[in-house]
Every structure is written in structure tokens, then in C-alpha cells.
Amino acid sequence: MTMTATRTFDEWRNKSLDDALLECRDMVESPDFETVQRWRDAGGKVAGHFQVYFPEEIIHAAGMLPFKVRGAPMEPNQADSHFGSYLCSILKTSLEMALSNQVEMELFISHPICDAARNLAAIWGRNVDYPSQILYLPQNPNSSGSVEYLRHEYDRIRRVAEEVSGVEVTDEALRNSIEVFNENRRLMRELYDIKRETPWLIAAEDAYALVTLAGMIPREEHNELLSTLLPLIKERTIKPEDRIRVVFEGGFCEQPPFDLIRMLGRTVYVVDDDFMIGLRWLTTDVAADGDPLENLAYSYIEHSSYSPVQHDTRKPKEDMLLTRIRESRADAAILAAAKMCEPGLEEQVTYTHALDDEGISYFLSEFEENMSSFDQLELQVATFVEHLLFA
């Protein structure tokens, strides 16, 4: 089966822009992950991969659907017994999806991005009847052998994908997948250009939905979605409002509730962020000629974004954040972290020192994916904004 054998998300088609964006939001907010089930109903296989980054081109070349496991709006009734109390929510709700058969897969791949997540693949594998693998990304990307090491890791995952899918993952298939994903990266950059240059043309929650759908539907389908809607967004005649421009930092793994993003969009212009950054991790096109796995490995080492769970001395995260703020001409930053997220909370300290040194205002906050009350937080953000506007 090829990745284009079936369409999984038709609700947006033949709709006005506003109605199409509404369909996108509804699909992302749904706890049922209908697109994944539609793919399986048509005979396709699914490979789930946990946050933050995974080379989806390998799964795509095997004819499977790469599904971004990002938690879910559900109570972890079964998963709670498999984890300690003081752990982040995304681990529990992601496992709950598997234990409750909310999302059925043929393969799951995780990464030891933190002390809590390093046990996820083992716990997952003991409780499902399909393979659960760990992708070991380089602990020291600065090493001269990091590209070669990562190329071998990617080749191991390729062999796993071949075994699960029953499809040989050839270099030609990988190059074709790289081309598809390069187009997707270009469209994602175009979307973020709109957010930075004309943020009043797209609501924060609409931009988030458009990005998140990339981890739920075939990439060819996502490319078609963005290619259709982005020109319509640019043609809007909405006038800008007097709002401050902010960068949101803290959505690299567990995702803020959709309503929190919607609340921020009512108050400020979110001109850049790290929401679902793993889907936008590679910042330039991957070379399509030569060894495709080596090209993917090289791009991860040399042309990638940043997060609190990657440690690269060439990319100090505080400097990367400052660059993100300057390039988006933001007035301030929102430094958020998921509750119980040690990497995110630790990085907040470094970020605040860097922003203090540069005289950049920031708002500190915590969130949890299933939080449902935002009145107090909205009041705090509004007070922060008023201080910036009228101080």
C-alpha cells in the first residue's frame, strides 16, 4: 500500500476558508483520532512515534502512516498504574491511547528524551502485542562520528519498518519520501512566515491546528491542505489590531490545551513558537541525492531546531530563543512548561537569565494538557500585556 492510496481528511474540502479552518480545529481537538482509524480501515498500517523528533521519511517510505503520539484529552485510568504520580501528563495519556485501543498501531517508537520518557517504550511494549522500539538519537551531536552513528540508527529503524510493513524500504523510496517532506517543510516555513509578518491573518489556534494535522494524516494530503489554504489566508483583508507580539516557548513535548492557545490568540499575536516542533525540526531541505539516510542524519546534526531535550553546545538554547525573538520582532516571550517536566522547568531558569540580560519582558507559566480552567491565567496574561502597553 502506498501513502497516497487513501485520503483520511476530506471534511475541509470544498469549504470556505473559515469553514475549512473550523474543520481542521475540530479534527485536531477530537479525542478519537479519526484520520488514523480511516487509514487503518483502508488497509494501512500505522507507526506511532513519541515526541520530540523522529525521521518520518523512513516510515513513509515503508508505506505506513507516521502518527505523532502527543498525548490526548483523556483521563489515564489504566495508564496511571504503570507510572509514578509525579510525572508529566503526556506519558500517561499517550500510553492510555494504546491500552484503551483509542489508537491502534502496528509499531511504536520512543526516545529517551528525559528520565521519565526513557521507560516509555519498555512499558508500552509489555502491554501491547506489536513491536515497541527506541530510537537513540546522539547524546553528543558535536562528536565527529555523530552523523555516521545516527545513519546506522536510522538504518536499524529502516529494517524494523520493513519487517513490520512487509515492504522493502529502498533508497529510491526514501528519496521520494524526502521530496514529499521537503515540500512539507517549505509549506510549514511559509505558514510561519505568515505568523511572523502578518499574524492578524491567522488565529493562533488555526495555525496550531494546521501544523498538528501533519502528524495525523499522510504528508501528501497535508501538503495539499496547506497548498490550498495558505494562499487563501494571505488574501484575507483583516486589519491588524493593537496587540503585543510574543514568542511562546515550552510546547516542545507535552502540548498546551487547545483552549489555552485560543485564549492567548485573543490577547496577543503569537508570532513564533515551539508547538509541535518535532514536525518542523529540520530547518532546511534535506538533500535528495546521495545516501538518503546519511542525508537525514546530517540534517538532524547540522540543520535542526532546538529543545530542552537536545544538548548541542553549538546551539545554546538561550541564544536560539533570543534569535527566535529577534527574527520575529517579538515584544516579549511567554515561557511555559508542562507540569512535572524537568527539562522544560530547568530550561526556564536559563531562559529567564538570558532575557533579563537583554531587557526582554517575559511571562512565566505552567500548563497541563488536560487543564480546563483558564480564567485566572487569562487575567494574568491580560495584566502582563497592559503593563507592556502602558508602562
Image: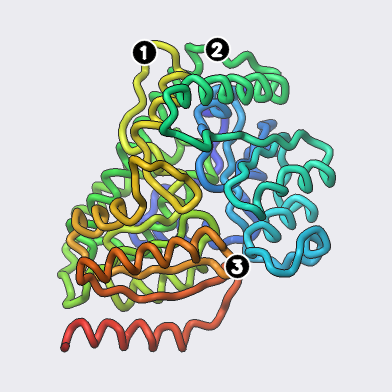
* Residue under numbered circle 1: 289
What kind of residue is marked 3?
Met
* Residue under numbered circle 3: 340
What kind of residue is marked 1?
Asp
Q: Is residue 295 above or below residue 229?
A: above
Q: Is residue 256 left or right of residue 202?
A: right
* Residue under numbered circle 2: 170
Q: Is residue 388 left or right of residue 281?
A: left
Residue 49 picture quarter = top right
Residue for point 38% across, 29% down = 299
Q: Identify the secondary structure beneath mark 2.
A: loop
Q: Which mark is residue 332?
A: none
Residue 315 on image: x %, y %: 34, 44
For the residues labelled 2 and 3, say whether their Cβ atoms are less than 8 Å apart: no
Residue 197 on image: x %, y %: 18, 56
Question: Mark 3 or mark 1: which comes first in sequence?
Answer: 1
